[in-house]
Image (tube, helix red, strand yellow):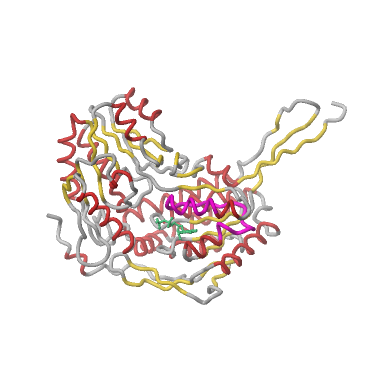
Amino acid sequence: RFSAAAALEEPVTPPVQVKYTQLLINGQFVDSASGKKFPTYDPRTGEVIAHVAEGDAEDINRAVAAARKAFDEGPWPRMSAYERSRIMLRFADLVEEHSDELAALETWDNGKPFDQAAKGELPLFVRLFHYYAGWADKIHGLTVPADGPHHVQTLHEPIGVAGQIIPWNFPLIMFAWKVGPALACGNTVVLKTAEQTPLTALYVAKLFHEAGLPPGVLNVVSGFGPTAGAALAGHMDVDKIAFTGSTETGKIILGLAAKSNLKPVTLELGGKSPFIVCKDANVDQAVELAHHALFFNQGQCCCAGSRTFVHESVYDEFLEKSKARALKRTVGDPFRKGTEQGPQIDEEQFNKILKYIKSGQESSAKLECGGGRFGSKGYYIQPTVFSNVQDDMLIAQDEIFGPVQSILKYKELDEAIRRANASKYGLAAGVFTKDLDTANTLSRALRVGTVWVNCFDVFDAAIPFGGYKMSGMGREKGVYSLSNYLQVKAVVTPLRNA
Ligand code: ADP
C-alpha cells in the first residue's frame, strides 16, 4: 500500500563532491597520527562515500594543544569582541554562499531530504551564527553593591578550551549550537563529530578559516566515541565539555569529566516526548502536527513526539487519520523532489528500529501500518503506526529514534499529565488544545525543557533548549547558552576615602 519503491533502485547522483576528509588541526588539514582512515557511508545504499582520517587520542592531544595555545597566546580571546563578531558574520555569509553544496553534502552523508537541509537547516545554521555573532560584543559583567567599603565587579571571561562532541542526526545544526556560543564568548574549541557524518563540519570549518578565524581556535577531529570522544571528555587540559547524544553515553562523559579535571559538563540527551491531543482539538490539525512531531528527520530527533496521547473522545478519528497520513508519507531518495522521508542513518539504527517494531508487535499494541523495511537497499523503513499502546510497553518507554508512532488513549487531563511525566526523560512536549486554561495547566505541569503549544519543533536561535531529568543538564541556544562558556570572576577593591 506504500508508493512504489522503484525510484530507490537508482539513487540520484549527489550534486556535490567530497573535498575535505582530513582532520582540521591548528588551521591545517592533516592526516591522523596513526594514518588510519574510516569509511563514511551513503545511507541510501550502504556504499562508501569517502574514507576520512580517523582521529584518536593522539590527534585529540594535538588538537587540544593547538586550542590551548590559541587560547593562552593567540589573538582570539584578546581581540575586540566586535572583531570576533565580524569574523563570525563573514563566516555565516560564506556558508550562505555555499549553502546548496553544503545541503547536498549533508543529505548525502545523513540521508535527510535535500529540501529540509537546503531550506530549513542551512538557513537556520546561518541564523544561529548571526545570532551568536550578535552576542559577542554584548557579554559583560556587573557592578555589585556589596556591604562595606568595596568596589565589586564581575568579569565574564571565556572558560578556555571547550571540548564538544556532537551526534549525526543534525550534523550542521549541532555544530552551530555548540561552536556558535563557545566562539562568541572568546573560547577555543576542539569538536569531535559523529563517525556517521563527518563531512559537513570539515567543510564549514574550512570556510571559517577563510573568513579570518585564527589557527587553533576551531579544531575538528573526525573519529569514534570510545577513542577520540573519550580522550576529549577525559582530557586534563580541556576546560569544558559539551555533549549531545544518547543518555548512556552522556553518563560516560560525565564520569570521564569527573575522573579527570572536573570540567563542567553540559549534556543534551535522549527523550520520549509526549504529544498531548486534548478533547477540544481540531483533529485534522492535530493529526498533521503529531505526524510531523514524530516522523520529522526520519524520526531521528531527540525531542521527537514519540508518545502521542489522545483523548478518548477523539481517539478513533485521530487514529484513522494518523494511519492514513502515515500511509501517504512519501518515502524515497532524499535528493528527489517531494521526498518527505529518506533512509535511517545506518545499519545499526535500522536494525534497532526494526527490533523495537518487533517488540511492539509482540506486545498487545496494534500495528496499524508499516512495520518493515521499505525498498530493498539502503536503510529505509516504512512509516509505522502503533495503536493501543500501553505505558509499560518498551515502545512507550525507550527512545526508538525512528519512524514509529505510538498512540495512547487517555480520559482525564490529570491522568495525561501523570502518565506524560512518568518517564525517565524530560526533554520536550507538545500540547494541542484550543483552551487557554488547559494549555497553561499542561505547560506548567509537564516536567520538560520545552513545551510547544499548538506547534512543534520550533527551533529559533533565541529559544533555549535542553532537558529535565535524564534528558540532560544545561540549556543551549538563546542567552542561556552563553553561561555554559563563561567563567564569572569577582573583583573586589577597597574604596579609600569613600
Ligand atoms: P547515538 O547512539 O545516537 O549514535 P551516541 O551517544 O553513541 O549516540 O553518539 C553521540 C556522539 O558521542 C558521537 O559523536 C559519538 O562518537 C560519541 N560517543 C559515543 N561513545 C562515546 C564515548 N564512550 N565517549 C565519548 N564520546 C562518545
Q: Is residue 5 magenta?
A: no
Residue 102 vs residue 256: left or right? left
Q: Which one is nearer the viewer's eye here, 324 or 256?
A: 256
Horizontal and vertical percent for residue 366?
Answer: 17, 45
**Quadrant hosting residue 338:** bottom left
- Residue lying farthest to the right in this orientation: 497
Decide if residue 104 is on the left or right side of residue 331.
Answer: right
For the residue pair 249 and 377, the one nearer the viewer reads as 249
Residue 363 higher or lower than 99, as above or below: above
Q: Which residue: 28% across, 68% down?
A: 45
Image quarter for ligand 1 equals: bottom left
Residue at 29%, 43% in the rendered image: 396
Q: Residue at x 65, y 44 (%)?
A: 487
Tell me the magenta residue range: 232-255
Quadrant of the frame with the C terminus: top right
Q: Is residue 11 above or below residue 312?
A: below
* In-image side of 262 versus 458 (left or right): right
Q: Is residue 296 above or below residue 347?
A: above
Instruction: Report x, y in % for residue 242.
Output: 53, 51
Instruction: Give the image location of residue 388, x and y in percent.
Output: 20, 40
Closer to the camera, 161 or 202?
161
Give the number of callouts.
0
The furthest residue to the left: 1
* Residue at x 47%, y 40% (from the top left corner): 464
Q: Position of residue 380 (x, y in %)?
A: 25, 60
Q: Quadrant of the N terminus?
A: bottom left
Magenta region includes residue 242: yes
- Res 392 quadrant in image: top left
Residue farthest bottom in this picture: 35
